[in-house]
Image: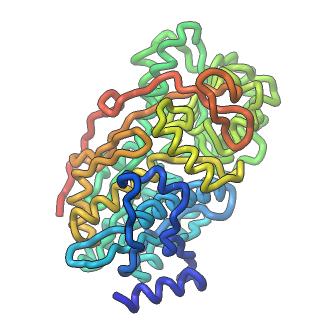
Amino acid sequence: MHQVASSLRKMVLAGVAGATVWGLGGVVTAAAAASPAKAGTAAAAPTGAPIQLALVESLSGPFANTGEAVFRNILMATERVNARGGVRLQGDAAGHPLVVQRFDSKGQNEEALSALRAAIDGGARIILQGNSSATASALLDAINKHNQREPKKRVLFLNYSAVDPAFTNERCSFWHFRFDAHADMRMAALMQLVQADKALKNVYLIGQDYSFGQAVLGEARRQLAARRPEVTVVGDELHPVGRIKDFAPYAVKIKHSGAQAVITGNWGNDLTLLVKAAREVGFDGMFYTFYGNALGAPAALGDAGVGKVVAVADWLPNTPGAASEQFYQSFRQRFPKPEDDYAHLRMQMMVEALAQSMQKAGSTEAAAVARAMEQVQVQLAGRTGYMRAADHQFQQPLAVGVMERQGTPGVKFDVEGSGYGFRVVREITALQAELPSTCQMKRF
């Protein structure tokens, strides 16, 4: 154990198998203020063998900003766990620190699969990924096969953003846990506002051409037909993922269609460039989005987005409550640069769930941790979420917000120094957000 810990500490400086390792220091930062541990409790620094978390994400290329946003949240979450003594396993006198290994998938599935192999060969048994359902699909298949072939080296796949509904329905796996609301759940939340907008008559659907984007548009059509059958879909198209540099032709079509609103699941630069192009061609309709609350989108829209961009999330910085405000302020203290401002509560709840599950299992063995995680409940920043054992879909409240200028009622915090933030206009309980599943899971 001592040799493993020593080797990993050396990796912090040297890197290993294309990865960079972070989190061994057990740094006590402002993040500790958001810890569930009792105030004033002194925790011994974790000195046990480090527990490796392999983050497989786009850390270069067109979606590098999304991967870096994930890393900041995972890092802060591990620091919180380490600051209170790490993870205590059965029979150990000392806690184990969580460390984060960064593997750059470069936005390519083959690179992600190579990273998975390197992570497993390096001893990681927890794989973290989420940005891209296409990549998640490839990893899920590979992990299922690996765990069948190598029962002594089984790994868990913790998914924080890949929201293709199939992953917790027909493709559910004992080795996969999703901590984000899936696309149908997010769409149902958005549709509450669409349903309330009685003036809305025409909408344009646009998304990225892969499983997630296709699922979003399909569910938008289904829910519109069920909830607002009088609304006309005046445009419905998919575009290549991460390859469009100029969205002006799409924006022109949106404007000329007569649409009063756009519904999109676009994320990263595909969203930022789309909303920027829409503003430049003079489109003044609503944007109903999954991810319009950050990563450059508010700044790209400026005043044109005030009152017209809707986003749905598990949590938003202006979510009411002292605990929520404390959590967000601790994040901003930890990462003060405006461009680093993208706090994801669900990612931090995921790390808390992992630490809690390992401690309950008394082990890092994948099946033991999975069985514990099926029963996990997490409280953080005034929110509570729990894992549904039937399909491994995390159940949590959702918040729907509308873009406003910072300083308007309900908008204490802006996004990325843009001067614009999101006012929470609807909060949906975990029970209200829950949807049925078709999962028929084989357990181990």
Q: Nearer the viewer, residue 311 or 363?
A: 363
Please state, as top left, top right, bottom left or bottom right, where the N terminus lies in the image. Answer: bottom left
Number of marks: 0
Identify the image quadrant of residue 358: bottom left
Q: Nearer the viewer, residue 210 or 416?
A: 416
**Residue 59 visible in the shown view:** yes
List x then y, in percent, for residue 205: 58, 29
**Residue 138 visible in the shown view:** no
What residue is rendered at 58% in x and 45% in y?
329
Image-based side of 371 in relation to 306, left or right: left
List x then y, in percent, for residue 202: 60, 15
Q: Residue furthest bottom?
A: 3
Image-based side of 358 in relation to 246, left or right: left
List x then y, in percent, for residue 366: 27, 69
Identify the image quadrant of residue 306: top right
What residue is rendered at 75% in x and 30% in y?
278
Identify the image quadrant of residue 142: bottom left
List x then y, in percent, for residue 239: 63, 42
What residue is rendered at 76% in x and 47% in y?
245
What residue is rendered at 42% in x and 57% in y?
137
Q: Nearer the viewer, residue 317 or 140?
A: 317
